[in-house]
Amino acid sequence: MKKFFAQLYIWVLLFLLYAPLVFIAIFSFTESKVLGNWTGFSTGLYRNLFTGRMDGGSTLMSAVENTLLIALIAAVVSTLLGTVAAVGIHNLRGRTKRVITFLNNVPMINPDIITGVSLFLLFVFLHFSQGYVTVVLAHITFCTPYVVLSVMPKLMQMNPNIYEAALDLGATPAQAMRKVMIPELKPGMISGFIMAFTMSLDDFAVTFFTRGTIGLDTLSTYIYTDARKGGLTPELRPLMTLIFLFVLILLVVINVRQAKMRKSPVR
Amino acid sequence: MPKDIIIDIKHLSKSFGDKKVLEDINLYVRKGEFITLLGPSGCGKTTLLRQIAGFIAPDEGQILLEGKDISSIPPYKRPLNTVFQRYALFPHLDVYDNIAFGLKLKGVPQDEIDTRVKKMLKMVSMSDYEDRSVDSLSGGQQQRVAIARALVNMPKVLLLDEPLAALDLKMRKDMQIELKELHQKMGITFIYVTHDQEEALTLSDTIVVLNEGRIQQIGTPTDIYNEPCNSFVADFIGESTILNGTMIRDRRVEFMGHEFDCVDEGFGENNPVDVVIRPEDVYIMSRLDGAQFTGTVKSCIFKGVHYEMYVDTDKGYELMVQDYNGFEPGSTVGLLIKPSDIQVMRKERLCNTLEGEMVDETHVSILDAEFECLPQEGLEAGTKVTVEVGFDKVDLLDHQEEGATGGEVSFLLYKGNHYHLTVLTDSGEHLWVDTDDIWDKGDLVGINILPADLKITRKDD
Amino acid sequence: MIKRSSWSIPYLAFLILFVALPLVLILVYALQDGTGHFTLSNITRFFSDKDSLSTFAVSIEVAVENTLLCILLGYPAAWILANKKLNRSAVTIILFMLPMWINALMRTLATAELFNMFGITLGKGTLLFGMVYDYLPFMIYPIYNVLDRMDNSYAEAAGDLGATPWTVFWKVTVPLSMPGVRSGILMVFMPTVSTFAISEFLTNNKIKLFGTIIQENINSSMWNYGAALAFIMLIIIGITTVLTGGRDAEAAGGAI
């Protein structure tokens, strides 16, 4: 009985949580302009989305491209920067370690708007013209802490003598890094990369403040502008549905990976 | 000094921050020798090994390998290999690739790598495991792989950092035998670090006993066991009772309220000494005539091969005795110790000697604290003084704040009828204390000394 | 011998340039007038401006209400999810986490569209509903995490000592799960105060939150006043972080 109510509670919450997303998904298969008005099954919106034949179609497609490209660059750079940083931080002691750990936490604790406004002021202050580059830099800023955070546990689990063992067997520091450390840190780096990529895809506020006035749009800013104009472009419905599926798959991949890692015997 | 020296360590010192970890270490290792660095945790033995391996640079001193100084050579260029305490196998490589790691880096041809790895696997009896992932191996198997991974490179010296510490007792005993055999077969010099005195006695040709960053004694296992040079070594190696004694004259020593014949000479007359008695060297019998002294059995525990008994002697000392025969607690027994079984050691110190400064006529500053003393004439404030305090004149209190200063009990020695403690004071100095109270290692204590017990003299410049 | 701690230097430089300096700049701009002279007028303006103050009050009110609702709804959910007897499926846990990874803007828009479809007027009620809907997963996840890792022997020990299941829950489980609740608060409260797009969509711009007026000022080139408002928000962040023990944010940050 207790179990029944518990399950009921969980599923009611989940139903409420997913209702809007499910509605969007359902109404992505009809061509009506307004949500809730079913005008018969059609994949027309999907077709429009992929061919770009719709109002403002080219700007939407370029927004999607921008989003993906920015997320890719930001994820690659922050994975490299974050991994190197994590190794450094792991070997630090005392005050410097506390300072850098604190600064690393700041972008995660700060609401997006603060990160966005503060970076906006930085670029204004440095007279750095805002656009693609500033958005990428801003994304690296809030993505890297997550990479550091996912690589650190790997470093802590790692036998501290492994690097020394490689040196002892004749590997130069560079060889020891390539042949021993990187293979060991790879799972953490991949998790960090996926997290950074998703964080970047997700972002709205930081992009909003750092994109400048050159008309650079990512998907989020595009949706924002579009919604403020009144009414959502119908083609956004299939796009949202696809993104939803994409995130679902990504998350399943991450969780399966983690479950595997947990299962592997403790060293 | 023998000619076949492979490693020669000269005046080696190392500090981490303010803490001196190693102080003026001098040591040589002969080719083919099995040498063990033995000491309690924190004694500096691992630091010494890591300096030989090249993971830590020494602050001062030299490490010579076959006569050449290697102190500034990075670890990957030293012809030495290490077996780490927790194995440090590469988890992403299988057994074969772990062992081949060093050879591949050296660019050894593939077919030679193959023969050498296979030969090595056979030597550590792991031939069937070459494709296994290292995570799937037991602790003992992982250790075999770690040893093979190091030895396959034919190092001039093999360094082993507590390699058996993570194994259970049974496995440890088996591996000890295998290690000893491996050492004999390969003829490679082994430098072995352990805190386990039994392991050291079993395996080594030479034992180096370390404590608090200094070498206490170097010798063969028999030397170290039978003739410990100070109370630390005597207490650390094997079981023993250490007692205060007086050397009456050559070959005659007094302890436990009785006089005994012994074989030691050269300690002068009526000089205080430490006496070490191994429990298996005390003869215990029910006959009282012919005994040197008598006692009452306090407790008797069967230990498998022998009985371990604590005996209260007629003059109020407690003595540990091991014998194949057990005696009922409460029974009166006769006791006898042969002259050659009495080990006499010079006392390291007779009282605490502290450096201090007069604060005013009735106060002196020692151990970074102010102590009241009897009025000192002719010693003005600011005079540098030497203060002597007897071991039994130091009061230890339960609470640190109750004392003039505080400290931590860092070492205990039971001397038959009282404890001899080493206290590390808050000022970082050592204070030795004789007490009847029971303290534990790590206890925080307050320290007080009565004014009359401070013997103050002007410090000679 | 090999100082790998130096590897943190590039990132430290990066953090100083892109995290520390920008935060300092918020203060610098907040204390300047348009011509770059020192002034306190931006700060005093906020405290004398009725509109700003009431927006601020509304934001805090909505944020508090939202946080409380999230705890009220989220704690039981987290407890059920972490209870092996009541929930054995990992799928439900993933389902609760999933929305955290979907653009909040999209989810909010979807909710707003749903309200429109059912003809519900947008206002305070829809704002709160939408907020709870947006932030509930961020409350459930950290609490679930703590409860899931909690050693069951505490509860068993309490039971062994005679506590009823009810007492065990209130005297053992709840106190031990407070770190999770604290990081949940951190992840819900501040974002609620600072969001701007969400409140615009959910109330048709009828109710403004603090984030919205920051955004409006920055976007209409009133940087100094915008910076002053951001600075006030930073102070609130500081207070909330100290009150909730900011270290927990690390646990929350690893949320996937």
Image (tube, coloured by chain):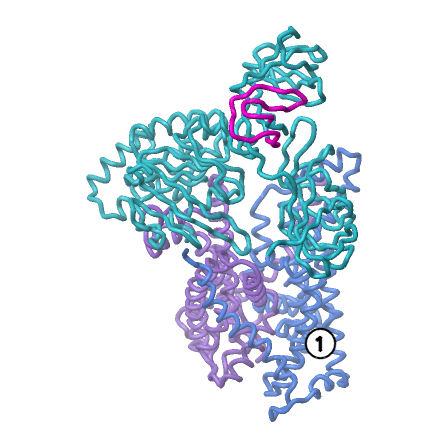
Chain colours: A purple, B cyan, C blue
Residue B427, given in percent of the width and then of the height, sits at 65, 52
Which residue sits at x=73%, y=57%? B378
B432 or C121, nearer to the observer = B432
Specify the quadrant of the image occupied by residue B242: top right
Which residue sits at x=40%, y=32%? B206
Specify the quadrant of the image occupied by residue C43: bottom right
Give the position of the C terminus of chain C as an image quadrant.
Answer: bottom right
A79 or B158, nearer to the observer = B158
B227 or B84, nearer to the observer = B227
Is the residue C235 above or below the residue B58 in the image? below
Which residue sits at x=49%, y=58%? A245
Residue B371, given in percent of the width and then of the height, sits at 75, 52
Looking at the rendered structure, the secondary structure element under dot 1 is loop
Specify the quadrant of the image occupied by residue B134: top left
Residue B453, given in percent of the width and then of the height, sits at 75, 44
**Magenta residue span:** B248-273
Q: Residues within 10 Å of mark 1 (few under 14, many from 20)?
A: some
Residue A162, given in percent of the width and then of the height, sits at 41, 47
Subunit that carries the residue with mark 1:
C
What residue does disc 1 label?
Answer: C207
Residue A59 falls inside the magenta stretch: no
Is the residue B229 above or below the residue C32 in the image? above
Which residue sits at x=52%, y=63%? A145
Q: Amino acid at mark 1?
A: Ile
Can see residue A24?
Answer: no
